[in-house]
């Protein structure tokens, strides 16, 4: 594909010279005589490889044109080179700060103009290719990271023969609550990750206690209650994501302050943990256990209502209630 450039200059002689140079080199060019034409001609359908822009034009100077071009997301990464007959260092400094890639002096020599334009186009393509490669590798690493976390969560759930898929369901419910609460897509992903890992501390609890079908003794219940702190200690070691331990440590805190391990109350409890607490309790009620199947939907709803403001943050309890009411066929449960 041929290179595409745009030249903007109110000096017709400069435009003709530039056209002659680029036509001979097989470079596709659009030649405009004013800043207003330049701003008006870009509709985002055809993106040039480079823009040559005169500084001194009567209707709109090059600095204003550059500002408007850079405000267009489609043109943000297109290199803009100022054409100028000035020897003014201040203008060059201002242009570089505004986002100009380079300056070319007028009158320009054909060979120098062509060489510098081709070099800038090639350099910009190289930067773009590198950015795309880094982005692709980052996305691949992110997918791998999520798969590792999902595998870890699955291994924790596998300790309890009656709660397969618990962590992934809690993560999904948590993300949906966060979405409805107005969280950004990035924060939704973070909350999903924390939901997956909220029970990671159970990896240190004996299988015999986790799978016990009869009532737990006080000593066994005390052991179960250690899993939030154990999970926080495990996740705290991931130094690049210190917030990852939030859901693990505080998802059993209660809005009224009667939860564990720290007895936090109300807004003392991190908001993410308050979201996961509702999702966790909902899935516990809608999952099958050794001693019962999942509870009827109306009973689950009534329990969320009863615990609104005591166990659960009212805001997130209300969102969960809306989700329940929308689930007319009771699909949000363990199958």
Image (spheres, grey):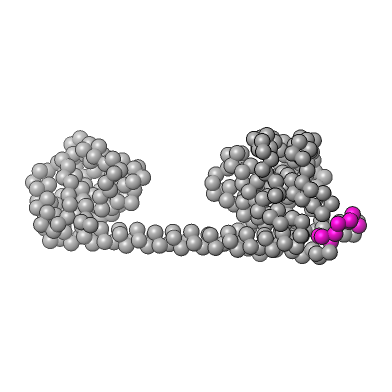
- In x, y percent, where is residue 45? 29, 44
- In x, y percent, where is residue 154? 67, 60
Residue beneath the point at 63% across and 48% down: 172
Q: Is residue 18 left or right of residue 273?
A: left
Q: Is residue 212 left or right of residue 78?
A: right
Q: In which quadrant of the rendered view does residue 220 lie?
A: bottom right
Give the camera-side residue of 104 and 37.
37
Measured along the vertical axis of the image, is residue 264 above or below residue 232? Answer: above
Instruction: Report if residue 294 lies within the magenta region.
Output: no
Residue beneath the point at 24% across and 39% down: 41
For the magenta stretch, what is the residue range?
A: 209-217
- In x, y percent, where is residue 4? 21, 52
Residue beneath the point at 46% across and 63% down: 137
Measured along the vertical axis of the image, is residue 192 above or below residue 313? Answer: below
Q: In which quadrant of the rendered view does residue 214 lie?
A: bottom right
Q: Residue 243: tell me if it is visible.
A: no
How many numbered marks does the figure carry? 0
Q: Residue 169: tell me if it is visible.
A: yes
Residue beneath the point at 30% across and 51% down: 78
- In x, y percent, where is residue 176? 61, 43
Main SS, magenta residues: loop
Instruction: Report if residue 210 lies within the magenta region.
Output: yes
Give the camera-side residue of 78 and 308.
308
- Please identify the quadrant where the N terminus is shown: bottom left
């Amino acid at each position: 594909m041929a290179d595409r450039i745009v030249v903007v200059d109110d000096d017709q002689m400069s435009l003709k010279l530039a056209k002659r140079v680029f036509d001979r080199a097989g470079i596709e060019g659009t030649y405009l005589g004013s800043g207003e034409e330049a701003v008006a001609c870009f509709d985002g359908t055809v993106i040039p490889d480079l823009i040559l822009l005169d500084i001194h034009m009567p209707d709109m100077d090059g600095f204003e044109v550059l500002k408007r071009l850079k405000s267009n997301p489609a043109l943000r990464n297109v290199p803009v080179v100022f054409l100028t007959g000035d020897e003014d260092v201040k203008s060059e400094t201002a242009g570089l700060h505004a986002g100009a890639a380079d300056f070319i002096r007028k009158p320009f020599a054909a060979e120098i103009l062509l060489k510098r334009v081709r070099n800038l186009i090639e350099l910009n393509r190289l930067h773009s290719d590198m950015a795309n490669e880094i982005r692709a590798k980052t996305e691949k690493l992110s997918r791998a990271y999520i798969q590792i976390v999902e595998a870890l969560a699955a291994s924790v759930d596998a300790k309890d023969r009656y709660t397969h898929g618990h962590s992934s369901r809690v993560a999904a419910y948590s993300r949906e609550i966060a979405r409805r609460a107005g969280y950004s897509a990035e924060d939704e992903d973070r909350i999903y990750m924390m939901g997956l890992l909220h029970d990671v501390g159970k990896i240190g609890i004996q299988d015999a206690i986790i799978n016990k079908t009869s009532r737990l003794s006080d000593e066994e219940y005390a052991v179960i209650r250690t899993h939030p702190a154990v999970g926080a200690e495990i996740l705290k070691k991931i130094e690049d994501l210190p917030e990852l331990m939030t859901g693990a440590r505080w998802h059993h805190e209660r809005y009224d302050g009667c939860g564990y391990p720290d007895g936090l109350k109300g807004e003392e409890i991190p908001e993410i943990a308050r979201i996961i607490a509702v999702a966790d309790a909902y899935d516990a009620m809608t999952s099958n256990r050794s001693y019962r199947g999942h509870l009827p939907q109306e009973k689950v709803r009534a329990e969320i209502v009863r615990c609104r403001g005591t166990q659960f943050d009212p805001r997130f309890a209300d969102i969960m209630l809306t989700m329940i009411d929308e689930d007319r066929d009771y699909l949000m449960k363990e199958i």
